[in-house]
Image: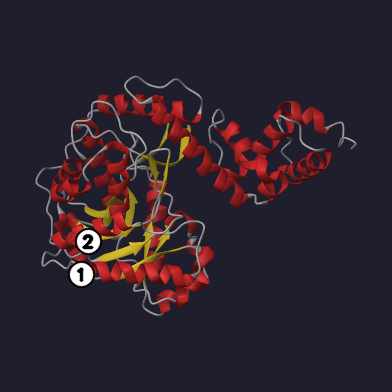
Amino acid sequence: MTVEAGARAVAGLRLGAGIGWRPEIADAVERMDVDWVEAVAENVCPGHVPESLLRLRARGVTVVPHGVGLGLGGAERPDPGRLAALAERAEVLGSPLVTEHIAFVRAGALEAGHLLPVPRTREGLAVLCENIRIARDSLPVPLAVENIAALFTWPDEELTEGQFLYELVERTGVRLLIDVANLYTNQVNSGEDAVRALDELPLEALAYVHVAGGVLREGVWHDTHAHPVPPQVLALLGELCARAEPPGVLLERDDDFPPAGELEGELRAIRETVRGSAAAVRGNVVVPRTGGAAVPGAARTRLAEEQYALLAALVAGGPVPGGFDAGRLAVQAGALAGKRGQVVGKVAPELPRLLGARYRAAFRAYATTRPLTGGYRRDALDFAAHVLEHADPPLPARTRRALTRWHADRSGPVPPRGGLRRWLGRGEPRG
């Protein structure tokens, strides 16, 4: 889709108040007074769209696919297969736009399993701009990109968050999904003034807004999407609305879901904040000022090396790259391991049930030196094998038998690896 056509389409959007659709709250969302919903794109199979989403669509509720896996801020150009999948979901859901993140999620063979910040440098911006142009040209509907929450910053950054996003829009014409909870996170964690960021942003390019909750742990704010929206985030939403009228505002909740009444209460608070801070400025067509010059290969190579070194430190036990805060990288590594453990626990719920209170610590010990490379089902099998071989203290005999049986049942024709293969060949232990 051309920049001008996409910009006009999004500039005319009026979404209203919405909520992130998740399977755990699907029934509740259908009963709520919501104008629209957002669904994680990678969790929607085009051939088997959840009935709940189909019913919402039939009622006229807009559904927006929200991608988490493109890695637009990565050194590699966007993967054509991932772009095609995102395009297919937009078409199946009849969506007016799709959204993604200003983040990198992989480097080489290493997967982060979550969103990581890009360096706010001129070179990093150039790579991001080219990747966004490639993605936009491959999609049937407009693309909007979201600022992320960061637990650490890159050394030697050249731009503030607001300046970085302003230049991104100026160069590409892309629309912005502004997450005010993420602006608050970055204010707490790195001292960036969130209100100043709003003043620097090109709010005429606003597609819509996210709000979400988080929690403060040992001086670091974690954007959990598992806690109520705090007053500070609602205040930032009010600051944004005083500067521009958002086409839509969406409440994100991904875990520890409260009763439907509490979610409805948060939606009411969002609507009241928007009404109480209404501004006259609305979205306009934004045409990029500069052309799409190709990024030199050397710039991508440098970024690839930097991102790989960083990700190796976070997920593979590698050394901390120069200039980074080792303490903050340790916090990020723990957060990545925790997030990965949550996903594995959903893919293979028997594992947290079998291991009980030991599950989280055991998974973190495994994940900090064993990068994710083969998907979460493979990860679950590898984790089970790791626990059977390295549990300290040893597993109770009954737990060991049950975990061994679980692993054998799910390994199929592919035998377990290494020492576990030899151990299983002797049969189950007595006990």
> In the rendered image, which quarter is residue 160 located in?
top left
Quadrant location of the N terminus? bottom left
Q: Is residue 291 visible?
A: yes
- Spot occupied by residue 350 in the image (x, y as percentages of width and height): 69, 50
Left or right: 365 with respect to 258? right
Give the image location of residue 45, x and y in percent.
50, 60
Residue beneath disc 2: 238
Query: Mark 1 — residue?
Result: 276
The x and y percentages for residue 351 are: 68, 46
Residue 15 seen anywhere in this rendered image of the structure: no
- Near-viewer residue (275 or 412): 275
Q: Quick one: SS at disc 1?
A: helix
Q: Where 264 sits versus 332, above or below? A: below
Q: Residue at 20% of width from left, 70% of height from top?
A: 276
Front in this rendered view, residue 95 or 386: 386
Instruction: Tell me the kind of residue under disc 1.
Output: Gly
Q: Quadrant of residue 5?
A: bottom left
Side of 260 relative to 201 (left or right): right
Q: Which amino acid does label 2 sit on?
A: Gly
Q: Where 247 falls versus 359 (above or below)?
A: below
